[in-house]
Image: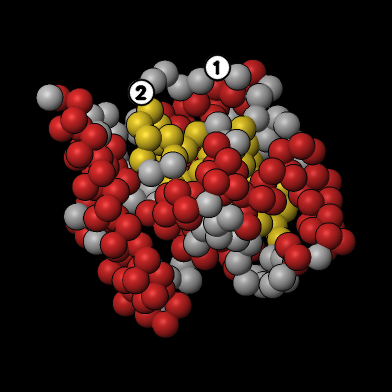
């Protein structure tokens, strides 16, 4: 498949593309016209940390066609390493940007993930935002389905039967990427986005931080305030120290090259 031109930058164990959100949408639209599919990983600090610590997860991320910087520490680390990563590209934003591209290209979207009723609500929001958008289907797999081969096969079969061109998979990393691996084998011309909480966000289940807070790299504080019991350990004990290590390592590599 033709690739978005360089540069890319290594952040932890992940190769992140230097690309704007609009460039991602343009690439996906061009690929649809050529009859080619692909997958997108939105690499936030949590994903980069997991991939850096587990080679199997790094290999899972590397299977994707595009890895974008979903997190300002990832953007900053890329810039410190010497590559001008232009902006943060989040899964929550790409849900809308790629759905808009699908509407313009007369492509069908499938929403997979979220509690019962949430993907249907998100689909309604997307249809209202992008008139003419075709929604091929929605699904809310039960908790733990991914540990049951029969339940996983049923989930895959539903998506395949709908024949979508874009599949938004909001199950969290690495569950969503593992399911995308199975789906790509059955739908090679479709594009897949692992979007985490992007589906409930699109449905209005909770609000994103303001644009100013996002640009400051502090959206994680907004999420922490919304879900402290679920996110406190991950954000404060695991991700925050790792983010500082990412930045210091990127700066060290930059300085070593400039000597």
Above or below: residue 254 compared with residue 59: above
Please state the horizontal and vertical placement of residue 145, each as a whole percent of the image: 75, 66
* Distance of label 2 from label 1 (alpha carbons): 14 Å
Question: For residue 244, what is the image quadrant?
Answer: bottom left
Q: Secondary structure at mark 2?
A: loop
Nearer to me, 103 or 60: 60
Q: Residue at x 60, y 47 (%)?
A: 56
Q: Residue 7, which numbered label?
A: 2
Describe the colour scheme in one phrase: secondary structure
Relative image position of residue 206 (x, y in whole percent): 42, 71
CB within 8 Å, label 2 to label 1 = no
Q: Which residue is mark 1?
A: 2
> Image point 46% across, 67% down: which residue?
204
Question: Residue 219: which numbered mark, if any?
Answer: none
User: Can you tell which of label 2 and label 1 is closer to the viewer?
Assistant: 2
| Label 1 crowd bin: few (<14), some (14–19), many (20+), radius 10 Å | few
Q: Is 50 above or below relative to 250?
A: below
In the picture, residue 254 is in which quadrant?
A: top left
Find numbered disc 1 in the image and state the secondary structure of the residue it sits on.
loop
Q: Position of residue 82 (x, y in %)?
A: 23, 29
Could you tell me which residue is drawn at 55 percent across and 31 percent down?
A: 65
Chain-order first, disc 2 or disc 1: 1
Residue 164 in view, yes or no? no
* Along the line of sight, the residue nearer the viewer: 174 or 12: 12
Residue 45 in the image, given as x and y percentages of width and height: 37, 54
């Amino acid at each position: 498949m033709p690739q978005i031109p360089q540069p890319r930058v290594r952040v932890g164990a992940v190769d992140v593309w230097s690309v704007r959100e609009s460039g991602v949408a343009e690439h996906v639209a061009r690929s649809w016209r050529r009859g080619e599919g692909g997958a997108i990983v939105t690499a936030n600090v949590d994903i980069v940390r997991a991939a850096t610590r587990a080679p199997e997860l790094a290999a899972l991320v590397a299977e994707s066609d595009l890895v974008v910087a979903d997190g300002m520490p990832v953007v900053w680390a890329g810039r410190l390493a010497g590559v001008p990563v232009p902006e943060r590209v989040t899964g929550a934003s790409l849900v809308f940007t790629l759905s808009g591209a699908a509407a313009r290209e007369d492509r069908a979207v499938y929403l997979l993930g979220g509690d019962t009723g949430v993907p249907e609500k998100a689909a309604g929001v997307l249809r209202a935002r992008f008139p003419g958008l075709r929604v091929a289907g929605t699904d809310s797999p039960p908790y733990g389905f991914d540990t049951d081969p029969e339940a996983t096969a049923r989930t895959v079969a539903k998506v395949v039967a709908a024949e979508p061109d874009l599949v938004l998979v909001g199950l969290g990393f690495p569950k969503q990427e593992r399911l995308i691996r199975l789906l790509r084998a059955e739908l090679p011309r479709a594009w897949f986005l692992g979007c985490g909480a992007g589906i409930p966000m699109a449905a209005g289940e909770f609000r994103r931080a303001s644009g100013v807070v996002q640009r400051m790299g502090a959206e994680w504080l907004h999420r922490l305030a919304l879900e402290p019991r679920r996110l406190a350990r991950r954000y404060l004990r695991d991700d925050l120290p790792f983010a500082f290590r990412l930045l210091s390592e990127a700066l060290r590599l930059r300085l070593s090259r400039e000597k």
